[in-house]
Image (spheres, helix red, strand yellow):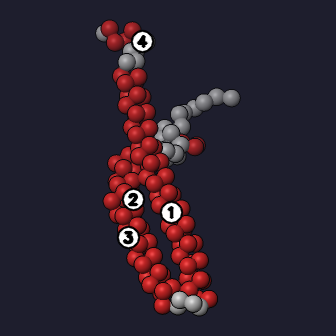
Amino acid sequence: MRLNQLDGGGGGAAGGAPDLATAPAKKKAAANTIETELEPNTSKAATWADAATTEAAGGFAGWATAAGLKTVGTTWDKQVRTLLARLASEKTALRGTADAFGRQETDTRARLAGVQPTSRIGQY
């Protein structure tokens, strides 16, 4: 078997496009959007819904509908807590991934900068 040419580079499978692309700035921006928009707006919506449900339950005092609305309110509160926890987790993961890729990139560049050619051609 003989190799007649190189694969043309590219880093991907069978000389295709690179497999890995990351954008730490976009990950940080997404995490900031979660923190500044999604989390606060979700909390506001939950508070508004709680107030509306409590008011509706009060209007049906003594009826089975009031008990049903209280159950709905409890379920809603659990779902909101789950959603907020998920958003916080995603925010943390996005920031952690952005930082990890950034550190890896810096480390790789530093190691490559320290590599010296092994050929004597540099002497000429």
Q: In this view, does 70 lie above or below 61?
A: above
Q: Position of residue 56 (x, y in %)?
A: 48, 87
Label 4 residue SS: loop
Q: Do residues under tags 4 and 3 come within 8 Å of each other at their CB atoms? A: no
Q: Position of residue 60 (x, y in %)?
A: 52, 91
Label 1 residue SS: helix
Per the image, the residue denoted by label 1 is 81
**Whole-Å distance between the Cαs marked 4 and 2?**
52 Å
Q: Is residue 90 above or below residue 58?
A: above
Q: How crowded is mark 2: few (under 14 residues within 10 Å), some or many (20 or more)?
A: some
Mark nearer the N terminus (1 vs 4): 1
Per the image, the residue denoted by label 4 is 119
Q: Position of residue 16 (x, y in %)?
A: 52, 46
Which dot marks residue 44? 3
Q: What residue type is labelled 3?
A: Lys
Q: Which amino acid does label 4 sit on?
A: Ser
Residue at left offset 53%, top offset 33%? 6
